[in-house]
Image: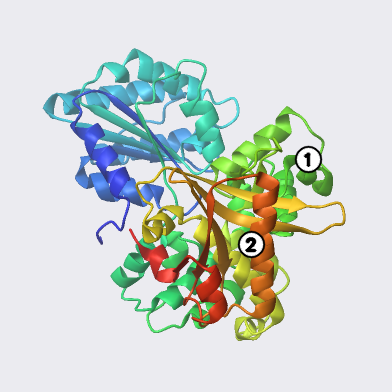
Amino acid sequence: MKNLIGRIKEQELLKEAFDSGHPELIAVFGRRRVGKTYLIRKYFKDKLLFQLVGTKDASLSSQLAQFSTALGNAAGNPRLFRVPESWSEAFSLLSNFLTPKLVIGRSVVFLDEFPWLNTQKSGFLQAFDHWWNSWANDQDNLVVIICGSAASWMIKNVVNNKGGLHNRITRKIRLLPFSLKETEEFLLANNINMVRYQILQIYMVMGGIPQYLKEIRKGESPEQAINRICFTKDGFLSGEFNNLYHSLFDDASRHLSIIRVLADNNSGLTRKDIIEKAGLSSGGTLTLLFDELIESGFVTTWLSYDRKSKDLIYKLSDEFTHFYLKFMEGHRGSGDQIWETLSTEESWKIWSGIAFERVCLKHIPQIKISLGIRSIYTEEATWHFKSANGKGAQIDLLFDRKDFVISLCEIKFSKSEFAITKAYAEQLENKKEVFKEQTKTKKALFLTFVTAFGLTNNNYAKRLVQNSITMDALFEK
């Protein structure tokens, strides 16, 4: 097996847990295909004494049969144990198996796809709750890791459990997609040699999802890879969209209605706007929908700089979702060269600008490093203003800094240096003036550009721009 790419903080946490000398109950969650199982299996290797993987929509008897086989595999004979009649009995068998092992040394139990083990009326969660509190929590040599893709379920039923598991989780890991730098390292480890612009193109489509990136072949250009993986009949991502959402949420229809509305509104929407456009009714269940989409990594929220509005701004943050809805949904199985055609159209230019902005918003720490403000406290926000006559100004990212500066970020994607024209320079000057007038800020306003290849060094750039950083800044660790 290859070495782990990235996941530095997560590995440090796992090491601390294994070395603690105390019973540990670790919750690991994150979206589908982000690498949760790989991380745990790769890091602990031979220290994994028992592993069980839940199966979505499987019956109680089927799950218990799998438990019996898994326990037998751990003991060296898959047929050694009979199938237990309940989860309470299953955990009793597990305790008996673990007891002599734990006398020898520290061991790890891994329950993967934990939410799927909790089938309706199975009593799984209650049995696990009782097992942990009555036995496992007293075993100083035991580390139990519970893992699931349904992030919202994990947080509600495990991390924030109000019953017997309340405050029992000793550590938690929310595994996020790779950063651009980690994506670069992952591709190199798989003998995929691409320049950073090509890696950026891939990331704008697939994000930093390891299982998606794994499908790229040596010698392919981004266009060839995207075309094969996304648009051919048997492409790995051709059926991923529906599987992705329906594997995470019991009833994904309302989640998808929110996602579709946000995909059509690139600047983001307030909760009220989403409810109206999606035709949803307000209430507690809707709050849960938003929470689930946020915890699963599909949606992010932003505050407005001036705080005049209490409403958060919701934005679609998942690269593949946006790409699918923009291009794939209407072009499934459309031919071998469909992406080469689509990527030359005007719709690609519009999408690429939005996609690049989304990537930048996920790399704010890297932008701060490049700006030299890593150690300066900042608050990141969005801002927009619309006057009575419909005119206004919008800033998709700003850094409100403690050194009496506000960095107003312009994020622009292009295949070469970006040139500020006379007309655009006038827009920028107007934007700064409107912002200053409406917010009444006394801080200095620094206009900052984030582009793929930098700015053309013309008079407008020299006069207006204080900071200019390229995509290379996004590849910082």
Q: Quadrant of the C terminus?
A: bottom left
Is residue 5 shown to the viewer in this render? yes
Give the image location of residue 42, x and y in percent.
27, 51
- If you read the primary sequence from the N terminus, does the residue marked by circle 2 or circle 1 appear first? 1
Q: Is residue 251 left or right of residue 70?
A: right
Q: Quadrant of residue 344?
A: bottom right
Which residue is at 51% across, 32% downward? Answer: 155
Badge 1 amino acid = Lys
Give the image location of residue 475, x and y in percent.
38, 65
Q: Which residue is mark 2?
A: 322
Measured Cα–Cα span from mark 2 to mark 1:
22 Å
Which residue is at 40% across, 59% downward? Answer: 371
Is residue 229 shown to the viewer in this render? no
Which residue is at 55% across, 44% downward? Answer: 296
Which residue is at 26% across, 23% downward? Answer: 23
Label number found at residue 272:
1
Element assignment for label 1: helix
Q: Is residue 272 left or right of residue 444?
A: right
Q: How is the image coloured?
A: rainbow
**Number of labelled discs?**
2
> Which one is in front, 210 or 315?
315
Badge 2 amino acid = His
Relative to 58, does residue 453 appear above or below in the rendering?
Answer: below
Label number found at residue 296:
none
Q: Quadrant of the N terminus?
A: bottom left
Give the image location of residue 63, x and y in percent.
48, 36
> Which one is in front, 434 or 180?
434
Q: Is residue 444 left or right of residue 24?
A: right
